Amino acid sequence: MNRVTMSGNDGLWARIRAALTRGADVPEPAYGQSAIARNPNKKPRLAQRIDEELRRGWSHCAERNVSLCVLALEIDRYAEYFAAYGREAVEECVESIEETVQAQLSRGTDICLRSGQTGFVLVLPDMPALMARELASRIAAALRRQGIPNRESHAGQVTLSTGIAVVNPQGKLDREVLKAAAQAVKKAQRRGLARLEVIDLRGREDRRRQAA
């Protein structure tokens, strides 16, 4: 943050410096300064939107004592696809995948959000892990039917890998569930194409409460 500096004890500049100092003490949101605060007409940044939906889903599940699933979906071999087809084709591909994913979400509480350049995050309140697995399978099957070509993949088409994290929310928001989903999808991709990995955090939460 730039500071106004000027020699002397002029009262005006002293007040300006004091105001700037007070402004520096205001905490920023979890993912940095809000885009909305800078420009009310600008859409929230992706990370902020994910955080908002995660917080909403967490509160919903904590109030009802039900589980929350977070799915991380990542395009397999994205770098190779980008190099072979270019930015415009990649954006069309991502938009098509987003439409495919959205078509599989039947509940109003299920949210699909873009996550970076290569994937999506699904926040799924009140969804058991088994149902989340079934949803991931439906998304994969729908994408296979769509058959988006990818000559850089031995599958011959674009595929998604999926990481699922499931938790029983209690108390204040714990973003570990989002981190766990991201870890799970990376682990799935290390195993191959269109793979699925699940991290169940419910046992860990139970052990924490027993220890407390």
Image (spheres, rainbow, N blue to C red):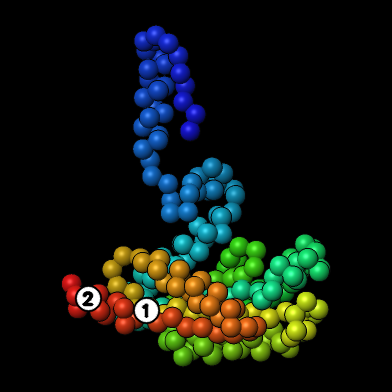
- Please identify the residue farthest to the front as the structure is shown: 190
Residue at figure coordinates x 51%, y 83% from the top left: 197
- Asked which quadrant contains residue 100, the reply is bottom right
Instruction: State which quadrant residue 44 falls in.
Output: bottom right
Q: Quadrant of the C terminus?
A: bottom left
Please indicate, yes or no, whether residue 57 appears anywhere in the rendered image.
Answer: no
Mark 1, residue position: 201
Q: Quadrant of residue 211?
A: bottom left
Task: Please say if 61 is above or below 9.
Answer: below
**Residue 129, x across and y down, in percent:** 44, 86
Residue in view at x 57 percent, y 68 percent = 113
For numbered disc 1, what is the local secondary structure?
Answer: loop
Amino acid found under the numbered disc labelled 1: Leu
Which mark identifies residue 99? none
Give the x, y percent position of residue 97.
68, 75
User: Which residue carries the number 2 mark?
Assistant: 209
Identify residue type, mark 2.
Arg
- For label 1, the crowd category at 10 Å Cα-Cα, with few meaning under 14, some 14 to 19 and many 20 or more, is some
User: Is residue 16 visible from the viewing direction of this image?
Assistant: yes
Please, what secondary structure does the residue beneath circle 2 have?
helix
Reply above or below: 26 against 21. below
Question: Mark 1 and mark 2: span between their CA atoms?
Answer: 13 Å
Q: Say few, some or many: other residues with alpha carbon within 10 Å of mark 2 (under 14 / 14 to 19 / 20 or more).
A: few
